[in-house]
Each structure stands twice: as C-alpha cells, then as structure tokens.
C-alpha cells in the first residue's frame, strides 16, 4: 500500500511541474483499465494515464480525487499534495461522462450540464434535494430529453427521468388554447372581472414561459392571476354560498399529450360549479410556429 501511495505522490509531483532526476525514474507500462467509483464507471483519458508497475496500478491522484468530488492542490515548496473535500465539486466534464453512463446506447445525444448550488425545486427529476447538484440534460436527434441529477461533490446519481420531447414555445401553444376558451365565452360575459390560470398541469413551462403566458392573456384588459380555485377561495374571490361562482374566469388544463410535433390538450374554463366547460384542442408545430388545428367540445357542467 505504501508503494502504491508513493507512486501516486510521484505522479502528482511530476504533473505539477516538479523536475524529476534520473534517480526518480521508473520503468512502467501503460495500463488501459476502467475504474468504478461507488458503482459508477470512469475511464482514464485525456491528459491522464494509468500505469502498471511491478503488478500494481498507478493512477493520477487528481483523477481519483475528481471522481470522488475532492479538491486537489499541490504545494511545490513542501512537495505536498493536499486533498480537501470542502467546497469541491465534481468537474463539469466528469459530470457529463457520469451522466452518459445512464444512457449508454444513446447515439447522437447532445449533453449539457448545469451546476445548481442549492439543489432543485420540487417537481423535476430530483425533487427537493439538499446540497449542490449537477443537472445534466441530454437531447437526442428526435428532440427527446433525458435528465440525470448528480450530487455535485460525490458524483452519485440522485435521479433519472425521461422528460419527453422538448417542444419549443409551449407558452404560445397554451396561449392559443386559453384564448380560444375565453373568446368562446363572450356570449356569457367574456372574462369578467379577471382571468385566473391554474398552474397545475402547466409544469412543462419554465417560470419565464408562465409569465409570458399570463402576459398574453393580459390582452383582454383585465387582471390576470396565477391561482387555482382553492387559492381563489382563500382570497375570498369565490361565492361559496352560490354554486361557487366567481366574478372572473378560471382557466386550467386537465392533460396534455405529445404526439410527435402535435399537442392534444384537454383544457377547461370555469365560472361557476354549474357553468364550466371542457374542450379538447389539437395543435401542431409548423415551421416553428404553433397552429390550432382543431377543437371539440368535451364536457359541460
């Protein structure tokens, strides 16, 4: 064990730029091997090599440390290698390679990694996690996305999720759906005092997309709220003694199905418990622009 550590220390010193004399030299052979860290496969490559010397494997300490989420510094004056966990993260390149192991047969996938210092909000693949994480997203040629969540310090896989097809400008698609519902309600008084949008079912939208969706509905010249029926009740906006009537309209989604470049959206408009309707909309992405292909009545209350 002492010889193995000595070999690693020597390699670290050489990689740090310290001159080595002939007496420090040894004869070794390249050792093409893969390594597993906590069950995760990692391959020595790039500027790193592993060696076989007298039947023992010698691996650069920086490679070992990076796989373990450790920080390595070399003090040339004292010829000391310092390994520290505090504040150290797995390198982005390592996070990308670890994520690829989760999708080994995905040819043509384009990967990108995002370091999130304080974990992820609930609702994505990771849910609520403590500590920093790498969010690595892969997109295949067909647009299907995969998300791999790794602990930023250890590289341990926390979550894996198929996110489906990455359809652009979904705020515009849902804007067409909700506008059609509001326009179809003109004979019953239009939007009324306000438009409320129930966020449930709209998890596909990023925060800025949701804001853009609310902005589009602002064209009706009434306040636009982000609220469910329960939230409207808490705000005192629902007449609980009269069929749960509201002075505005509540828009929401029941479900969204992705069929290639098409969306099938079941949405509803609510005014009272006896004045709600659901409709099915089919939208198609044509040259990057969403078009409303068809709509049909679903249910009424």
Image (tube, grey):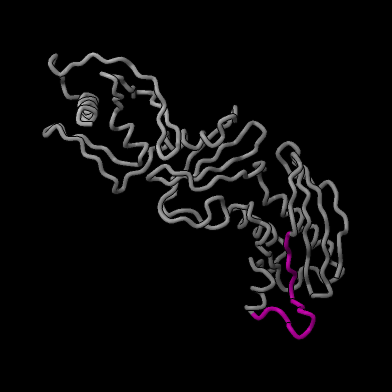
- Going by the image, does 138 lie left or right of 76? right
Image spot of residue 49 (x, y percent): 33, 22
**Residue 29, picture quadrant:** top left
Q: Quadrant of the C terminus?
A: bottom right
- Going by the image, does 133 lie left or right of 22? right
Q: Is residue 242 magenta?
A: yes
Judging depth in this view, the residue of 17 and 291 nearest the camera is 17
Q: Quadrant of the N terminus?
A: top left
Q: Is residue 80 magenta?
A: no
**Position above or below: 50 against 170:** above
Q: Residue at x 55, y 45 (%)?
A: 160
**Position above or below: 171 against 32:** below
**Position above or below: 262 against 242:** above
Image spot of residue 243 (x, y percent): 79, 80
**Residue 211, picture quadrant:** bottom right
Judging depth in this view, the residue of 155 and 175 nearest the camera is 155
Examine the rendering and report whether any part of residue 18 can be seen.
yes
**Position above or below: 245 against 6:** below
Q: Residue at x 80, y 57 (%)?
A: 180
Image: magenta residue range? 236-253
């Amino acid at each position: 064990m002492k010889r193995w550590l000595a070999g690693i220390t020597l390699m670290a010193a050489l990689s740090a730029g310290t001159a080595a004399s002939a007496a420090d030299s040894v004869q070794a052979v390249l050792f093409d091997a893969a390594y597993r860290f906590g069950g995760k496969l990692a391959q020595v490559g790039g500027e790193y090599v592993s060696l076989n010397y007298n039947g023992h494997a010698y691996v650069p300490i920086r490679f070992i440390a990076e796989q373990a989420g450790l920080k390595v510094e070399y003090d040339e004056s004292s010829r000391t290698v310092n390994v520290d966990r505090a504040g150290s993260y797995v390198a982005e390149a390592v996070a990308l390679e670890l994520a690829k192991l989760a999708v080994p047969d995905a040819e043509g996938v384009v990967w990108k990694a995002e370091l999130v210092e304080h974990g992820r909000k609930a609702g994505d693949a990771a849910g609520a996690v403590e500590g920093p994480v790498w969010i690595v997203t892969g997109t295949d040629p067909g647009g299907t996305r995969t998300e791999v969540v790794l602990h930023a310090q250890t590289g341990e896989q926390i979550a894996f999720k198929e996110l489906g097809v990455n359809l652009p400008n979904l705020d515009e698609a849902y804007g067409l759906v909700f506008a059609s519902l509001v326009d179809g309600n003109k004979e019953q008084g239009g939007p009324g005092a306000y438009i409320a949008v129930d966020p449930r079912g709209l998890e596909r939208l990023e925060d800025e997309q949701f804001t853009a969706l609310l902005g589009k509905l602002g064209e009706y010249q009434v306040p636009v709220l982000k609220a469910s029926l329960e939230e409207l009740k808490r705000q005192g906006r629902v007449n609980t003694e009269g069929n749960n009537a509201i002075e505005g309209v509540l828009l929401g989604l029941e479900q969204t199905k992705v069929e290639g470049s098409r969306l099938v959206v079941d949405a509803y408009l609510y005014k009272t418990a006896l004045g709600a309707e659901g409709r099915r909309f089919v939208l198609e992405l044509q040259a990057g622009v969403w078009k409303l292909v068809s709509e049909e009545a679903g249910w009424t209350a």
